Image (cartoon, rainbow, N blue to C red):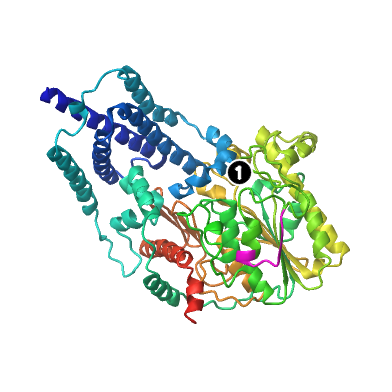
Amino acid sequence: MEKTRKKFIIKLFLITFLILLYLEMVFKLSIIGFERSNSVSKVFAFTLAYSMIIFNFLRLLPRKAFKGISLFLVIFSTFFYFAQDMYYRILSGFFSFSIAGDAHTGVAFLGRVMRNITWIHALYLLPIILALLLFFKFRKVYIPKKYLFFNSNYDFFNSIVIAILLFSTVVHTIPKSTDIFINSPYIYSDFDFYKEIPSAYQTIDKFGMLTYFQRDISKMFKESPDEDSLYEEINEYLEMKTEHVPNSFSNYFEGKNFIMIMAESFDTYAIDPSLTPNLYHMQEKSWNFDNYYSPLYFRNTADTEFMSQTGFYTNRNTVLTMSTYRNNLFPDTLPKLFSREGYGTYAFHNYTDYFYPRSDFLPTTIGYGEYYGAERLGMLEYREGVITNHEWQSDLVLMEKAMDILVEKDEPFFTYMLTVSGHLPYSHRHPIAEKNIDLIRDIFIEEGREMPSEDILYYHAANYELDLAIGYLMNRLKEEKMAEDTVIMIYGDHYAYGLDQSDIADYDETKDIESPLGFQRVPMMIYHPGVYGYDLSHVFASIDIMPTVANLFGLNLNYKPIFGKDIFGDQRRSVFFSNGSILTDTFFYDLENETYTFYDEDMTEEEALIFVNEYIYRQYINQAILEIDYFRVKERLGE
């Protein structure tokens, strides 16, 4: 009997361990690869420890619940690995469990999941198939109590001690120092990557997805940060930052009206002389930033919006940064900076608060004098519950209504417009795209152009509405004799991830399927009748918009506490991607392959490594500023 019992327990442990190890290896094969063979041993060791913990948990279950809960755990684990796989393929990052409560907004991405399915994903089904076979085979088989459960307090205590010792040993063997000898405070050890997850990709690569899950859950329940020590640490870092130095672009547009348009899914190939002539001609006469990126972080449009308005990065450990920190004090946001110069500040958007609470965030947190959403503009009523058939509204109608309001204002104005016509899905289910699709098809036929895929046609049809809006804006400004006094900025909130990347690469020769981060390069242009159109190759990211605008308009900004940079300044320009890769003017660090590509022959790998690690530390300080409400603490202390 005892021999049979031991065999049963060993088999149960082995099944638990092999299923988890199998899922880790499939995920590694799909997303990370096996090039870093030294990381496999740590993944193996951690998986062994987690298996022991789960195994002990299973032995505590009532016999009637054992089989059902075991099956559930296999299905849940498999779904978790698969979901992280898909999330990375679509958004180039890994989600935190803190956003699980906001899962209903993910309905919009279901189509993208199907497009990203590969043969590898069939491998995820094997554990579920195995678990189902075992479940039905042994569903009615009676398991003696002594086979499964601990048969004494000593047995229980011994198993728990072994599990704890195994896990503790694995953790304590993680190196707490690095063999890289560089005179910099920004070098991270493996233990730092385990404890703090400064880069989710590196944490998963080094220790596995289950460890990322464990650390993610742990951070959700961590104690509130020590405000005093964090405040001092923030101050120490900010003091080391260099001061902003005025440059040849400072005050360039001082006193002008400013219209800033963040266009939904506005991508490089949306600009076409025949399909979007107004946008094309504007780009030809604008400062065109052909190295501008709107990196995908964790909540896409909302994250780009937060960064471009505040100059701070978003926090991946929250459901939604603009909601979590809506009561924070941000003394220097774009509308607040303009308001201090006597400007009226207005925000317009042609959709409701279904996805994001803009009617509260934009006027209350960010400081816009007035916010006009789709409801206030009379375009759409708010709908409760989960929505699968969004009624995307016309950018042209938004522009007409916005300009009717703006022309009545006496003071100079700063206006932020967030468009929505370019939103996915790119099919007949998109009302604006369906309205324009025949016209787009006719242009392709009349010009004898090769017909692209159906979804790209619908993408053009959706963005045709944005082009109509820009045409109307330009004409209206001329009619009202406001053109000479108004500067226009247009940029994409993110690339068109509603389209398959392979389709994009086939259609747009500037995009390469082998360089997925390159897809996050989107249009950015600044137009004014008094400027000459030319291309600028400055590396430019969405977080840099606020300080760059402040410099151009001569706004009184304290540049030190923010993390965006004036791209006309003398600091190294850079883009920080969600997976931890970094692009600068002088080098590109590809985190996935751990390689450096240099654009300046004087740049060394040591200098690049210091810069990369400082950027990781910057993320930590940025998050600390948000978490302790740094500026309110500073105000309370009278500093």
Q: Nearer the viewer, residue 280 or 628?
A: 628
Q: Residue at x 21, y 54 (%)?
A: 172
Residue 479 position within the rendered picture, expressed as x and y whole percent measured from the top left: 88, 62
* 467 within the magenta span: no
Q: Residue at x 68, y 44 (%)?
A: 383
**Label 1 Cα crowd, 10 Å radius (few <14 / some 14-19 / many 20+):** few
Q: Which residue is mark 1?
A: 509
Q: Residue at x 84, y 66 (%)?
A: 408
Residue 608 position within the rendered picture, expressed as x and y whole percent measured from the top left: 40, 62
Q: Nearer the viewer, residue 201 or 246?
A: 201
Residue 544 position within the rendered picture, expressed as x and y whole percent measured from the top left: 57, 64
Q: Residue furthest bottom?
A: 638
Q: Quadrant of residue 462?
A: top right
In which quadrant will I find the N terminus?
top left
Q: Quadrant of residue 553?
A: bottom right
Q: Quadrant of residue 509?
A: top right
Q: Nearer the viewer, residue 82 or 390?
A: 390
